[in-house]
Amino acid sequence: MKRILLVEDEKPLALLYEEELREEGYDVTAVHDSETALAKLKTEEFDLLVTDIRMPGRNGIDLITQVMGLRKAIPIIINSAYQSYKDDFMTWAADAYVVKSSSLAELKAKIKELLER
Amino acid sequence: MIETYHFLDSDFQQESSRELTLLSIISQSYFQPFSLEDNLVLILTALTSGSGVGFNRAMYLRRDGNRLRGEAWLGPRSPEEARSVWEVLSTPGIGYVEIIEHNRALLRANEDSLTRRIRKLSFTSSDEPDLLPAATARHKEIALVRDAAHEPQVDPRFLETIGVDEFLCLPLLARDEVVGVFVLDNAFTHNPIQPRDVKLAAVCSLLAANYIHTTNLYHRLVESEKMAAMGEVAMFITHQIRNPLVTIGGFTDQLLEEGCEEGKRRRNLSIIRDEVRRLEDIVFKVGHFLKVSLKEPVYADVQPALEAAALEGEAGAQAKGILFQAKLEKDSPLVFCDPSTLGEVARNLIDNAIEATPAGGKVTLHAHRGKDARTFVLSVHDTGKGISAVDREKLFRPFFTTKEKGMGLGLPFIKRVMDTCGGLVEVRSREGQGTHFLLSFPSQEERRPS
């Protein structure tokens, strides 16, 4: 079973993603901040990282930079409420950029695509 | 007849202090805030005062796209007024401060007379044929007009308004851009305009043009900063609203799926209800912040409002296992504020302090007379996590927050309150050690009936 690490500071939203992605047949670990995510990435193996950008403490862009420093070939999906971070070149390091929507179809499709690659 | 002059051939003699006087008046504009209105007075004064360039009247036409529009006209309105004005201004002991004040009043009075006449004027620099004063802007050339009535290159509408036979048109050039035109004349003394006057006025116009240009750029910058701030607000609201919407939409979809069991159904509905409440709360808080009009401050007894805030603080602190101490000076002076707003401000600071402080910490509310007898200090101190130097810079910006659930409107509200009553806010903080907010209000001792 493919393992996904999900970083989302809004707890109800994290719960929604967790349930919906589990339904799709993935093993999902949801965390609420970048520090915890980084600690998990250092000790466990994941097949995909989905992260929000604007979060209290270290933001998602910081997290991506750190993950790149770990030299793990893990695909990354940015899942943000904002369009505008697409202009920040640091987000280009991610493999996909999804703007949050109440329909999770796009997120699910991107996850599938990246995991099958 | 029209004579043309160039900006660069200034060969001033060092024989008089006129140039220096002129430069000193104009240079004052560089020490003023960016207010075009105030500085126009200075510049037009330099052009018209006897010890400056000494023209009788000075007119400023502002460039607005490809049009020139009449903006201000300084000078006496009639020969009688000219005589009385000059009498006043030649009184011994009258200095520039007085002349500038006098001209400020005159310019304001002219709003209804001279200036009003030129406000109706507007010339397109692309008009054919090429007429003065617009031509001076188009060719970036100084034009001295003599015998204007017989000069076909002068716009007849303009001639009718200015009503003199001899005048000087100066383009206002700043970095090769024309920002306007000055038109100068000697309507009352009828002194012929000398080449020396032209040269002095030209220097004056270069300085003025640079000033006007800088002011225009400054205002453009302020505008774009406002737009950037708006962008930040829009971005914040997008985030605040999109997250609950996605949550509501997603959990609703789950409800609509076949065979959604009772437990999950109830849970989803309660999440949806919470998110809706959150959206309502956002709408309420933003509306409250944007619209709320503050009550006028008065000198008031603030003791009851502070005691109430202290009681609430006590309860909040206790619930979190924090020690709360209120030191309210008895017999406090009258404080310049609206007491209920002051109560809200105190509660706001206490709530922030409690939120930033871990269990076992301490929050202190202290209200006392300031060092001088005319201030009253309200201070809230905590032993919490402190605020980083980077965050301290942005503390009073609307929608800036470090809290998970905060809107970032509390401190901007406090800043607004303090601005309204002429008070000051001071923040001292050390990361890991705590934060100290000090608000100083104007105050006065109560006058007791004798």
Image (cartoon, coloured by chain):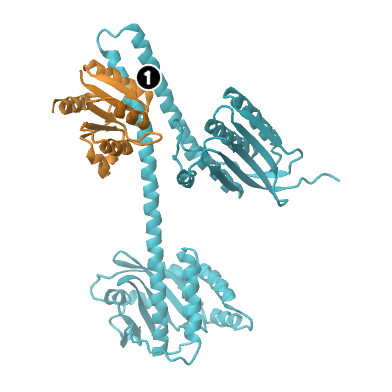
Chain colours: A orange, B cyan
Is B341 in front, or is B81? B341
Q: Is residue A63 above or below residue B106?
A: above
Q: Position of residue B382 (x, y in %)?
A: 59, 36
State the quadrant of the C terminus of chain A: top left
Residue B299, picture quadrant? top right
Count of numbered badges drawn on the protein: 1
Residue behind mark 1? B272
Q: Is residue B111 visible?
A: no
Q: Does residue A1 appear to the left or right of B295 in the view shown?
A: left
Q: Position of residue B195 (x, y in %)?
A: 39, 89
Q: Is residue B262 above or below residue B9?
A: above
Q: Position of residue B376 (x, y in %)?
A: 68, 45
Is B306 in front, or is B127? B306
The chain containing the residue under callout 1 comes to B
Q: Is residue A3 above or below residue B170?
A: above
Residue at position x 33%, y 76% in the image: B133
Q: Is residue B385 above or below residue B211?
A: above
Residue at position x 48%, y 92% in the image: B15
Q: Is residue B410 visible?
A: yes
- Specify the amino acid type for callout 1: Ile
Secondary structure of the residue carrying tag 1 is helix
Q: Residues within 10 Å of mark 1 (few under 14, many from 20)?
A: many
Q: Position of residue B365 (x, y in %)?
A: 65, 36
Residue A98, picture quadrant? top left
Residue at position x 37%, y 36% in the image: A58
Q: Which residue is situated farthest in the front direction here?
A: A43
